[in-house]
Amino acid sequence: MPLHFEARTKPSAKMVWLAPATALALTAAAAMIVFASAGLDPVQALATFVLSPLSDWYGVGELLIKATPMILIGVGLSIGFRAGVWNIGAEGQLTIGAIFAGYLALRFGPGDGIWVLPSMIVAAVAGGMLWAAIPALLRTMFNASEILVSLMLNYVAQLWLSWLVFGAWRDPAGFNFPQSEPLAPAALLPVIIEGTRANISVVFALVAVALGWILVGRSFVGFQLRVTGLSSGVARYAGFSPHRAVWIGMFAGGAAAGLAGVGEIAGPLGQIFPTVSSGYGYAAIIVAFLGRLHPVGVLLSGLLMALIYLGGDSAQMSLGLPSAISGLLQSLLLFFLLAADVLVQYRIRYAPRGRSALGAAA
Amino acid sequence: MSSLVAQLIVATLVAGTPLVYAALGELVVERAGVVNMGVEGMMVVGAVAAFAVAMATGSLGLGVLVAMAAGMLLSLLFAVLAVSFNANQVAVGLALTIFGTSLGSYLGKSYVGMALVVPPSGLGAAAADIPILGQLHPLVWLSWVLFTATWFFLYRTKYGLALRAVGESPASAHAIGYPVIRIRYLATLFGGALAGIAGAYVSLVYTALWTEGLIAGRGWIAVALVVFATWRPGRCLAGAYLFGGATMAQLFAQSAGVGLPSELMSALPYLATIVVLALISRDETMMRLNVPASLGKPFSI
């Protein structure tokens, strides 16, 4: 092949941020192909997909409320990912957060105490951390892969929630639908933008971004985590405990996911369903990568991913496409990003065959 | 009583077969030093592709072939990014799983809840006289053929030796003239093909209907099985049937009226995976002796 990759002497700082932009452009192109293959005008369909969700304030509120769980979890996961700790269990940790907070909301919410909501938040964070502690413990004690353990626990958490909502928590006045009774007002998060559903959890997400930025960019712990991720040998030599990195990474993701869980049931859902997450735990993995594992990047990519979610909904309503298209485009975005990331470490060189002996290596 | 035992054996083989395919494929991939965590995604796409083709043409065989091709296509995508471009293998594998799952629900939207009417195969009728095993689907038989062939390939041919060498030390394999990248590509494609068949088996034979979440983590369990098996095909086969048996025991217990919640029973395979994973991984020396030494590490010339 006349084109080949040549390793850069150091990673390209420009490509680090150009790669996501390239990936986004490629995803938009892929979306247009999908639209065209469904018999739609690609340009107009893309415009509908991207613009119609944001046509009014309510839409902006929806964007914030969708972006919030992904930003929260994305910030939490990126702390672990930096250290090479792969927490794939945010979906389950979110679910456990919802279960823990949901118990308090159903049990004490009708009593109308002002302490209900704060204790729900604390319980959700604790629940998420507890669920994340299982893979952390098995990894540090038994060397078991945290990827597989945390992933398996997603299914377990989901089944636990189904058992509750199909059983003990089912609303007796709910026409036998698998759902809890609506949460009492004392158990709901206050709305912060009039006329929308955007609630206080948006602020939590912003606080998480700020905290994440301090931890990642301004603290010694953040430095230790990054060194651990880059080279575990160096980290060990410098005396940074790999076990501590596992615990910090898992706890950060678990706490954030738990918080996102209470944000769902005490926010847009307002009651507990067998599924409390629309795949936010998995989408947040994409958000973390797309945001370059940096809190500010996660903030931007979370908003973008939320827009794709909303675009999927409006594609379903006004274009007649399955809303699963948003998941498809989100995952394509990740693929294109991983491909574009090659250009951070390598440059493409044109070397016709035979002219360069080195070129033949490719 | 003996008929119940026979039923249990058949049910175990039937439930374990998708794991046999998927885990055997991933084992070969990992023996070449590549870890593809996208098995779940490839299985989902294989399942939906097979189902769509079988619905349209009425041919199960064609469905399986298309599923194989779909799995290989996805694994090619993985190989380009992870083997050629040296992207992080875990990240690409995760991306593949997320992509495959979303692609599956996008493509499968119009098939949700549909059931496949399976025409009895001629081969099945011919084998029906054999006690117990005669009831099994040809794909179950094929999995045994593939298992034997894979074992023979890995341990009794020079190509298998080359593949294992690439997994242990790609630099040495390269130095003595083996095409490391090509071998890794072929291994990854083999894994994709088998994951595709595994998915097709689930949607065509095991359930014969399409719902979302049909694969339900089987691809991940297959990845875990390779670790349990300490990268050896024989143990992989045994592990797959152990899990198949566990799945079936749960159904038998439910129908026998064991008073445990069905959700708890459904959670058992996942919990069992966690427990076994912890028990096996515990022995760090044994893991280090068995894991392909270059597993997950990119190789460039």
Image (cartoon, helix red, strand yellow):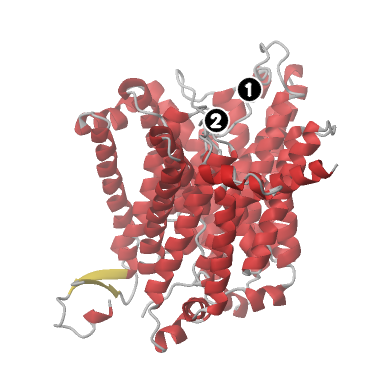
Q: Residue at x 24, y 72 (%)?
A: A4
Q: Compute the Cα span from label 2 to label 1.
A: 17 Å
Q: Amino acid at mark 1?
A: Gln
Which residue is disc 1 drawn over?
A: A271
Q: List x then y, in percent, for residue A139.
A: 69, 62
Q: Residue at x 13, y 82 (%)?
A: A355
Depth order, front residue of B106/A214? B106
Quadrant showing the C terminus of chain A = bottom left
Q: Quadrant of residue A269?
A: top right
Q: List x then y, in percent, for residue B289.
A: 66, 78
Q: Is residue A44 left or right of residue B56?
A: left
Residue A328, numbered label: none
Q: Secondary structure at mark 2?
A: loop
Can residue A244 be seen here? no
Chain to which mark 2 belongs: A
Residue A200, numbered label: 2
Chain to which mark 1 belongs: A
Depth order, front residue of A283/A198? A283
Q: Is residue B42 left or right of residue A176?
A: left
Q: Are marks 2 and 1 in contact (CB under 8 Å)?
A: no
**Residue A240 vertical placement versus B103 (above, below):** below
**Residue B221 vertical placement versus B160 (above, below):** above
Mark whose residue sits in front, 2 or 1: 1
Q: Secondary structure at mark 1?
A: loop
Q: Amino acid at mark 2?
A: Ile
Q: List x then y, in percent, for residue B179.
A: 38, 79
Can residue A228 be seen here? yes
